[in-house]
Image (cartoon, rainbow, N blue to C red):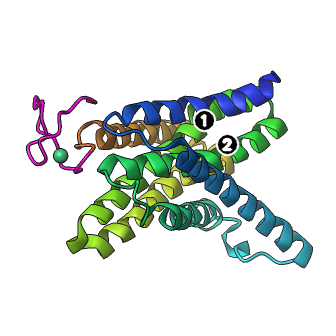
Amino acid sequence: MDPLLLISILPVVILLGYIYLKDKNEREPLGLLLKAFFCGTLVAVLILLWGVFEGIAGFSLTAFAENSAVLKSFFQAAIPEEGLKFLFLYWLIWNNKEFNEHFDGIVYAVFVSMGFACVENILYVYSGGFGTGVARALLAVPGHFLFAVIMGYFFSRARFTPLKRKYLLAMAFICPVLAHGLYDTLCFAMEMYGESTGLSSVLNVVFIAFDIKLWQIGLKAIRTHCHVCGAKIPKGEINCPYCDQMVKYS
Ligand SMILES: [Zn+2]
């Protein structure tokens, strides 16, 4: 296998396998998971096509964002990418009968997000080379995984908490946008102003701290909430105190 293709796809496969195997109570059907993954690839294709269209038409909707790390991150990446992922997730899963447990929202959100990350990763790695592939396998692809865990967590909370549905659905969009936007802001800031301002090392440290925090939030959402009802499991409990589901995943 072509090493560039291998390093592009491997992190995606590992993270998909991880979340699939974590869903121990009732595994999701492979057909629907593949559809979710395909929806994610479609998000990437739509965004690419939009870029091509803008190129041909000679205009850019987000031209105002070009020279600012913050605006660029939110308007050219986080909002369109997380927004489309959210819309496809909602369209495919919200009313599906397979979406019957809290953890399912996280699983499907991760499959959508990894579909997107897979296409994006192949494109970046083939233009940047093997070093880019290694860096992206450690940072960008897990980043997309963690944004999806956050989206899926709130998406499920919204689905199974009718009283706060609108608020939680809004959070399922806003929280991954914030995480993704801040993540990219730090990356772009390192590229755009790191050397000129002499703040490279400070920005590096902030970025690493932010990445660690994201991992903590993501793993907490996966490990410390009941996979059936979503309730927080008190430390040391073997059964969920709310739905009596045995906790086999922490
Ligand atoms: Zn429970």
Q: If you read the primary sequence from the N terminus, does the residue marked by circle 1 or circle 2 appear first?
A: 1
Marks 1/2 in contact by CB < 8 Å: the verdict is: yes
Q: Quadrant of the C terminus?
A: top left
| Residue with the mark numbered 2 | 118
Give the quadrant of residue 156: bottom left
The answer to whether residue 245 is magenta is: yes
Question: Few, some or many C-alpha atoms within 10 Å of disc 2 (few <14, some 14-19, many ≥20)?
Answer: many
On the picture, is 60 further left or further right than 116? right
Q: Quadrant of the N terminus?
A: top right
Give the quadrant of residue 46: bottom right
**Helix, strand, or loop for circle 2?**
helix
The answer to whether residue 28 is magenta is: no
Queried on whether the Cβ of the residue with tag 2 lies below 8 angstroms from ligand 1, the answer reads no
Question: Few, some or many C-alpha atoms within 10 Å of disc 1 (few <14, some 14-19, many ≥20)?
Answer: many
Residue 189 seen: no
Q: Amino acid at mark 2?
A: Cys
In the image, which residues are magenta? 228-248
| Residue with the mark numbered 1 | 12
